[in-house]
Image: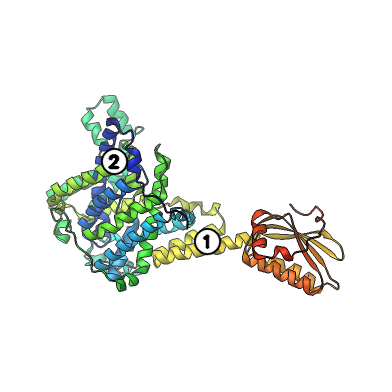
Amino acid sequence: MPPLAPFRPRLLQELRGYNGERLVKDMGAGATVGIVALPLAMAFAIASGLNPEAGLWTAIIAGFLISALGGSAVQIGGPAGAFIVIVYGIVERYGLANLLIATFSAGVLLFLLGWFKLGSLVRYVPISVVIGFTNGIAVLIGLSQLRDVLGLDVAKMPADFFSQIATLARHADSFNPWAFGLAAACVFGLFLWPRLWASESGFRKKLDELQTVSALKATSRVPAPVIALVTLSLLAWALDMPVETIGSRFGGIPPGLPAFELPDFSWETVKLLVVPTVTLAMLGAIESLLCARVADQLSDRPKHDPNQELMAQGVANAVVPFFGGMPATGTIARTVTNIRAGATSPVAGIVHAATLALVVLAAAPLAQHIPLAVLAGVLLFVAWNMGEWREFARLKQFTNHYRLMLLSTFFVTVVFDLTVAVELGLVLAVVLFVRRQSDIFRVDATGGSDTRLHYKLYGSLFFGAVAKIDPIVAAVENAPHPLHVVLDASQLISLDTTGLDALEQLHKALDKRGGHLSMTHLNEQPRSLLERSGFAARLHPDTPEAPSGGAG
């Protein structure tokens, strides 16, 4: 049995040689990300069919654990947009209590994946499948927010695509222009704010020319979602707009710490939740490791440890259900914000969690005034940034195989289910890979005589390519006299047991007619399999080298 992955949080490594300068940078970055996480955590929870405090305490608890125990120096963990569709579907189908059990079980599975050093397996998911389901999730997030964006009087949105469309159409007459105005202003402001303060913008250049006071320029560092949340909430409150708020729908956010509660756990329930559990674990692993890879590219810190990261994700997801939380993973937007704010170690992630906890404990009563239309606007912006829409325009540059995998995963995610979409995408990836590899394998005749046939093998002789040996078998069976077949394996890269069986059938056909089979120039892997199976001993040993020639 291979050795298990050691449990070595990156925090311990980063604290060696840690100094005051890095602490100041980490505290500034952590405070910034903590403020950014506030509206996102509430929005993700509400969109998932949960109360806003579920998202907030997940961001705090899971954010702390992922930073303290993870394998990345700068990754920020918490509730993510990618989970919205999955969590909403689980709550609709199985109920909130079973969501908590599925989250805990997914945490255990994630920890085991990291412990058994299986973190690298996530990289085997084709990028076309990842883009397909990511864009599909973005579409579903946007669709799920139209109720609050339009201010429709819908008690509860269904989980599936067509039912959501029908529900929105059925309640279109309850359109609320005040809610729509707030959502539109939020989206517009989120697009405009970073561009307004960009160094090359006319507004920024004008401020620099006027040598505007630093206090005004300092507002450029305030994250756009926070600006939108505060200003539009104040506007809605001051004008007494007739829009739904956190207070009117959820009764506000309870002050104080969350209670520790044990879900009603049973083995029968766990068996019922296998599919949701695997889906949460798989999506969490993919999202967290993709996020960690993005962090590696943007940061000058040492590369992440995928196995340690999965173990930390597992611990976080196993703990948060006991506090009424939701699934958590690495979050790209908050991680990028963390890096750009100057983070140097996991201390920034810990500060982010502490900042968010202080804000929640101190300002929980104020949250009841936040309009749901504003949070919906934030999520529309998140969905837009989450999708890789340019990939649709670039499809014409790629093969039909790539287009088929991306588009099928996308449409199945939107119309049916993310789990089915990823399964379909992976099955298509395997089938198309087998087809490509079988196309690459070929058998070329390189000469011979009436009694000797020489062939050269190229590529991998595996279960998808064995049919290309059949013409040699047919030539042996139709020959009027015994033949000696020589296979030049110098370009044979690999051989599997089905390929070995095809060679054995060729050997039997030759042996039955008094002929012989020889193989020359065997590479290491094919030779090893032939020797271990005992087939090498049955090959004809006394054969001159096959004549050179043929394709190569």
Disc assigned to residue 429:
1
Q: In which quarter of the image is residue 347?
A: top left
Label 2: few (<14), some (14–19) or many (≥20) C-alpha neighbours in 10 Å: many
Q: Quadrant of residue 344?
A: top left
Q: In this view, does 256 lie above or below 17?
A: below
Q: In this view, does 303 lie above or below 203?
A: below
Judge left or right: residue 162 versus residue 478.
left
Judge left or right: residue 31 versus residue 459.
left
Disc assigned to residue 348:
2
Asked if one can make out residue 42 in the rendered structure from this viewpoint, the answer is: no
Q: What residue type is labelled 2?
A: Ala
Q: Is residue 71 above or below residue 452?
A: above
Judge left or right: residue 242 versus residue 112.
left
Of the image marks 2 and 1, the number of the one nearer the N terminus: 2
Q: Which residue is drawn at 73% across and 54% down?
A: 521
Colour theme:
rainbow
Q: What element carries label 2?
A: helix
Q: In x, y percent, where is residue 123?
A: 47, 53
Disc assigned to residue 502:
none
Q: In x, y percent, where is residue 540?
A: 78, 63
Q: Which amino acid does label 1 sit on?
A: Ala
Q: Distance between the residues labelled 2 and 1?
A: 39 Å
